[in-house]
Image (cartoon, rainbow, N blue to C red):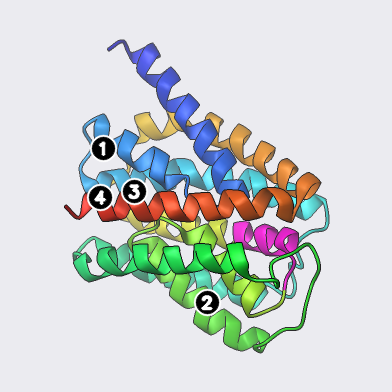
């Protein structure tokens, strides 16, 4: 396959992944198989995926910030916890395998999909918080951050669920803040992967522009359509990631 043709395919896949990620998460379901398809090892695929995904999450985060959808001061502690959690996860995945995690995550995602589908709390209206912000930062920020650095699929779903179920955010606010955390965890993991020399930059550069465009478009759609768009896409993405992970185990 010609280099230009390969770059065009990777650009298109990254654009779609960035769009899906900004709305509901799960873009790695598109990009990681593509990176494995071009011949990268599993760790190289995870590392290179972070290198291109950080641009999509950055574009979405900037758009949400400009529209006033993110409380940056209130999210500061969660950002810090997410960063260190993701760094620890990216360090761990370079030395450890996670078969137990791979079996557990699909079941969790299916449960979360059912929650988003059936719960009356999932709407465009804020509700009451069930946990203190500091506890949320330590529990969700560190825990989901570690998961994203270590493995990754469904990270945006986990963050969005935490913001809806624990802090009472509307779908718009939850998605916006989830994307900020996703950018944070992508960046932290990327720095660790760069240190380990695992990023294949020629491939990452081909996908970055697609991620930027897809992330911006996805964020725009979230703010325009809210829960009526995010809810079904989030459920579909959760079930798709779960099915892919379950099939990979056989």
Q: Is tag 2's residue or tag 3's residue first in the polypeptide sequence? A: 3
Q: Earlier in the sequence, mark 2 or mark 4?
A: 2
Q: Which residue is mark 4?
A: 247
Residue pictured at 72% horizontal, 51% vertical: 228
Quadrant housing residue 89: bottom left
N-terminal-most mark, 1 or 2: 1
Quarter holding the N terminus is top left
* Neighbours of disc 4 within 10 Å: few (<14), some (14-19), many (20+): few
Mark 2 crowd level (few <14, some 14–19, many ≥20, 10 Å Cα): many
Q: Say whether residue 1 is left or right of residue 184.
A: left
Q: Which residues are magenta?
A: 169-180
Instruction: State the image quarter where residue 29 is shown.
Output: top left
Residue 145: horizontal and vertical position, in percent? 46, 68
Spot occupied by residue 185 in the image (x, y as percentages of width and height): 49, 61
Q: CA distance from mark 2 to mark 4?
A: 27 Å
* Of marks 1 and 4, the one in the foreground: 4
- Compare marks 3 and 1 and give the one earlier in the sequence: 1
Q: Residue at x 46, y 30 (%)?
A: 13
Reply yes or no: does residue 247 show up in magenta: no
Mark 2 near mark 3, Cβ–Cβ under 8 Å?
Answer: no
Q: Which mark is residue 36?
A: 1
Closer to the observer: label 3 or label 4?
Answer: 4
Label 2: which residue?
140
Label 3: element kind: helix
Q: In the displayed structure, would residue 238 be above or below residue 167?
A: above
Closer to the camera: disc 2 or disc 4?
A: 4
Mostly what secondary structure, the magenta segment?
helix
**Residue 106 placement: quadrant:** bottom left
Q: Is residue 176 magenta?
A: yes
* Disc number lying in front (2 or 3): 2
Find out whether the residues at labels 1 and 2 contact each other: C-beta distance under 8 Å: no
């Amino acid at each position: 396959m010609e280099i230009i043709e390969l770059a065009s395919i990777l650009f298109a896949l990254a654009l779609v992944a960035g769009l899906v990620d900004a709305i509901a998460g799960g873009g790695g379901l598109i990009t990681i198989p593509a990176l494995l398809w071009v011949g990268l090892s599993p760790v190289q695929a995870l590392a290179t995926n972070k290198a291109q995904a950080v641009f999509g999450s950055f574009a979405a985060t900037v758009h949400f910030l400009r529209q006033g959808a993110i409380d940056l001061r209130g999210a500061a502690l969660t950002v810090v916890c997410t960063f260190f959690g993701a760094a620890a996860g990216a360090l761990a995945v370079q030395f450890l395998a996670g078969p137990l995690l791979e079996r557990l995550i699909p079941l969790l995602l299916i449960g979360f999909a059912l929650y988003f589908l059936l719960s009356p709390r999932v709407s465009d209206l804020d509700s009451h918080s069930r946990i203190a912000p500091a506890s949320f930062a330590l529990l969700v920020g560190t825990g989901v951050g570690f998961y994203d650095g270590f493995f990754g699929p469904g990270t945006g779903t986990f963050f969005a669920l935490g913001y809806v179920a624990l802090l009472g955010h509307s779908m718009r606010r939850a998605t916006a803040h989830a994307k900020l955390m996703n950018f944070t965890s992508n960046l932290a993991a990327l720095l660790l992967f760069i240190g380990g020399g695992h990023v294949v930059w020629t491939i990452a550069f081909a996908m970055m522009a697609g991620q930027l465009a897809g992330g911006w478009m996805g964020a725009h759609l979230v703010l325009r359509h809210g829960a009526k768009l995010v809810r079904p896409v989030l459920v579909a993405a959760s079930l798709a990631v779960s099915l892919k992970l379950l099939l990979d185990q056989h």
